[in-house]
């Protein structure tokens, strides 16, 4: 932080290059990317929440910035699964969790997972037995976060909440765009009452943080 310094982020959205100013809440993510995206390189946030992929990352980043800026600073980590796949496996989550398991965050970090398919259900249950002893694992009631958004009609992207059939037709780019749209517009009340698993996961992450 320097009074005469301004940071900007450049990224492409829908084929267009966009430049936006980086505020204090976004700086940890810029540093995280510059360091190579390794959990070992993070600068000790109050806690971690591990989510499935890019859609969840974009959504939670915006919700926290808009409605919970007064809460403990947490770092959002993607499980590095392929967001274009309709089937996600527990291996992606374990890949991120393992480096953190033996450090100071082992009994604190929180994991939010999609509802497992029949093929991955056994792996998820085994994972819960090994790592879910401190109420740190939360599971959505649907296979994708797009099916958990509030039932709200948007003039630009139709209904926020999508059916399984609609989700299966979406690619990663469309999911990311929807996540940004919902994250930028969802009210605090909608989030807390209509996305209960997401809110409970965040609340537990704050509760287990080093600030409490």
Image (cartoon, rainbow, N blue to C red):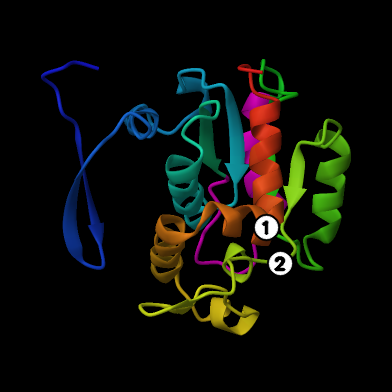
- Residue 8's tag is none
x, y percentage for residue 168?
57, 78
How many C-alpha atoms fall within 10 Å of the one at disc 1: few (<14), some, or many (≥20)?
few
Residue 107 placement, left or right of 187: right
Look at the picture and state if 168 lies above or below 92.
below
Instruction: Provide residue 17's location: percent of width, then percent of height.
Output: 16, 57
Residue 89 seen by the camera: no
In percent of the image, x 49 and y 59: which residue is there?
186
Q: Residue at x 71, y 23 (%)?
A: 106
Asked whether 109 or 212 is in front, the reply is 212
Q: Reply yes or no: does residue 75 show up in magenta.
A: no
Among numbered discs 2 and 1, the one appearing first in the sequence: 2
**Location of the N terminus (image quadrant):** top left
In which quarter of the view is residue 117 placed? bottom right
Quadrant in the picture for residue 203: top right
Relative to residue 98, is residue 5 depicted above or below? above
Q: What is the number of the mark on residue 193?
A: 1
Q: Residues within 10 Å of mark 2 (few under 14, many from 20)?
A: some
Residue 66 placement, left or right of 107: left
For disc 2, the marked residue is 142
- Left or right of residue 129: residue 13: left
Secondary structure state at the residue bearing disc 2: loop
- Which stretch appears magenta? 79-100
The x and y percentages for residue 145 are 60, 62
**Closer to the observer: label 2 or label 1?**
1
Please, what secondary structure does the residue beneath circle 1 have?
helix
The residue shown at (53%, 39%) is 77
Percent position (x, y) of residue 179? Answer: 46, 61
Q: Nearer the viewer, residue 6 or 193?
A: 193
């Amino acid at each position: 932080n320097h009074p005469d310094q301004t940071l900007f982020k450049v990224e492409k959205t829908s084929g267009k290059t966009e430049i936006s100013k980086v505020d204090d809440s976004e700086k940890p993510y810029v540093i995280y990317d510059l360091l190579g995206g390794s959990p070992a390189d993070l600068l000790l946030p109050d806690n971690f929440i591990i989510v499935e992929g890019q859609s969840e990352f974009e959504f939670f980043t915006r919700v926290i910035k808009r409605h919970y800026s007064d809460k403990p600073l947490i770092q959002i980590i993607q499980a590095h699964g392929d967001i274009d796949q309709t089937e996600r496996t527990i291996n992606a989550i374990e890949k991120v969790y393992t480096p953190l398991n033996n450090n100071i965050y082992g009994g604190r970090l929180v994991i939010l997972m999609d509802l497992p398919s029949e093929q991955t259900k056994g792996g998820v249950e085994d994972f819960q037995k090994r790592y879910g002893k401190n109420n740190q694992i939360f599971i959505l009631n649907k296979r994708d976060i797009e099916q958990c958004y509030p039932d709200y009609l948007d003039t630009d992207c139709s209904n926020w909440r999508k059916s399984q059939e609609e989700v299966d037709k979406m690619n990663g780019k469309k999911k990311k765009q929807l996540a940004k749209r919902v994250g930028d517009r969802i009210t605090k009340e909608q989030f807390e009452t209509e996305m209960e698993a997401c809110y409970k996961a965040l609340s537990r992450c704050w509760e287990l943080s080093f600030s409490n």
